[in-house]
Image (cartoon, rainbow, N blue to C red):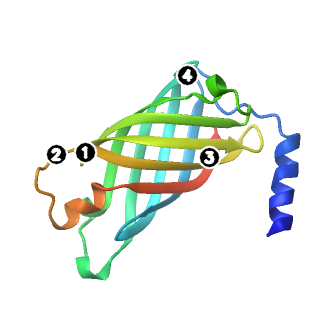
Amino acid sequence: MKKIILLMLLIASFANAQVFNGKGDVKLQIGANLQKDGTGIAASMDFGLSENMSVGLISSYLLNTATYLGTPKFVDRFDIKGRFNANIGNVLNIDDNLDIYPGLNIGLKNFGGHLGARYFFTDSFGVFTEASFPIAKYENKITEYDYLNNQFTFNIGASFNL
């Protein structure tokens, strides 16, 4: 494990990739969605509007849910959200390869927020992590499967510069 981490650090030290290039920049992220009572896949795409702002979409699908929940339908497992990001990696000036992006999202199940980070090893490939949480749920009383898409979620995976 130490050798793998050392190799990643060496590759990163030779890389000269800027994570967010501003207007016209397009990022694709594919990864695992981890949350209470379920795991699945998540994919997002962000489009740069200006030096520090982007908009996009994120979709998730739960592949596995807790057995006590029974078998949820497709509509219970699926969610899609529009999102707005404030890409502040260059403002914080930590590393050219690192972008940190807080943001807001509105979807089929709720209105919420997220905080994410991307690190690019090359001009086209990197990794990301993102935490998302609901701020306002559309239903006052959340029952059964509604809870699956109205809770804290954690995503981790690969990021691509298109």
| Label 4, label 1: how far apart the Cα atoms are | 25 Å
The residue labelled by disc 4 is: 52
The residue labelled by disc 1 is: 110
Amino acid on which the number 4 mark rests in the picture = Asn
Classify 10 Å Cα crowding around label 3: few (below 14), some (14-19), many (20 and above).
many
> Residue sitting at 13 percent across and 50 percent down?
139
Q: Is residue 66 above or below residue 129?
A: below
Q: Are marks 1 and 3 in contact (CB under 8 Å)?
A: no
> Residue sitting at 64 percent across and 27 percent down?
92
Q: Quadrant of residue 7?
A: bottom right
| Label 3, label 4: how far apart the Cα atoms are | 18 Å
Q: Nearer the viewer, mark 2 or mark 3?
A: 2
Residue 106 in the image, given as x and y percentages of width and height: 30, 38
Of the numbered discs 1 and 3, the one sitting upstream in the chain is: 1
Q: Secondary structure at mark 1?
A: strand
Q: Secondary structure at mark 3?
A: strand
Q: Nearer the viewer, residue 142 or 83?
A: 142
Quadrant of image for the C terminus: top right
Q: Residue furthest bottom?
A: 67
Q: Nearer the viewer, mark 1 or mark 3?
A: 1
Amino acid on which the number 1 mark rests in the picture = Asn
Of the numbered discs 3 and 4, the one sitting upstream in the chain is: 4
The residue labelled by disc 3 is: 159
Q: Nearer the viewer, mark 3 or mark 4?
A: 4
Amino acid on which the number 2 mark rests in the picture = Tyr
Amino acid on which the number 3 mark rests in the picture = Ser
Residue 75 in the image, given as x and y percentages of width and height: 24, 59
The residue labelled by disc 2 is: 138
| Label 2, label 4: how far apart the Cα atoms are | 30 Å
Of the numbered discs 2 and 4, the one sitting upstream in the chain is: 4
